[in-house]
Amino acid sequence: KNPVKPTADSLARGRRLWAANCATCHGITAESDGPVAKFLTVPNITEDFYKARPDGRIFGVIHNGQNQMPRYGFKFSADEKWDIVNYLRRLQGVAGAGGAE
């Protein structure tokens, strides 16, 4: 379970981290349209399959990596990883992903 509430602060931190670290491959909108995506197989993580994954699974992929995605466990604190999860959920349009506060 995600211990970090999707507050405005969490979403802002997640957005900054996403733009600096994730968007290169996944794109600003998480639709696999980042500049590196043309060279790698990057999933569109706004699709229903990825929306249905639990927050903990997404956290685990950020921490441990998967397929061509490197691990970022060493780079981000636990709270920063949860901020990224919260921001991704916002991009995915998942209910409960937080709103303007």
Image (cartoon, rainbow, N blue to C red):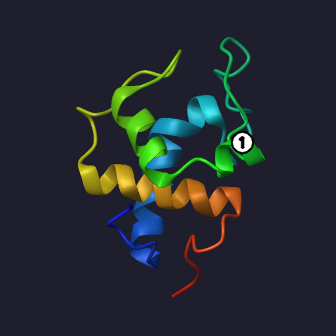
Is residue 87 visible from the viewing direction of this image? yes
Residue 62: quadrant of the picture: top left
In the rendered image, the residue lying farthest to the bottom is: 101
Numbered disc total: 1
> Quick one: label 1, few (<14), some, or many (20+) residues within 10 Å?
few
Residue at position x 70%, y 64% in the image? 93
Q: Is residue 101 left or right of residue 37?
A: left
Residue at position x 35%, y 28% in the image? 64
Is residue 16 visible from the viewing direction of this image? no
Q: Is residue 76 left or right of residue 50?
A: left
> Where residue 32 sits in the image (x, y, percent)?
71, 33
Does residue 39 sit above or below 77 in this rendering?
A: above
Residue at position x 48%, y 53% in the image? 55
Q: The N terminus appears in which quarter of the rendering?
A: bottom left
Does residue 4 sit above or below 65 in this rendering?
A: below
Residue at position x 74%, y 40% in the image? 31
> Where residue 12 sits in the image (x, y, percent)?
46, 66
Q: Is residue 4 left or right of residue 26?
A: left
Residue 75: quadrant of the picture: top left
> Where residue 24 sits in the image (x, y, percent)?
58, 31
Residue type of the residue flagged with mark 1: Phe
> Where residue 6 sits in the image (x, y, percent)?
46, 72
Q: Which residue is mark 1?
A: 49
Label 1: element kind: helix
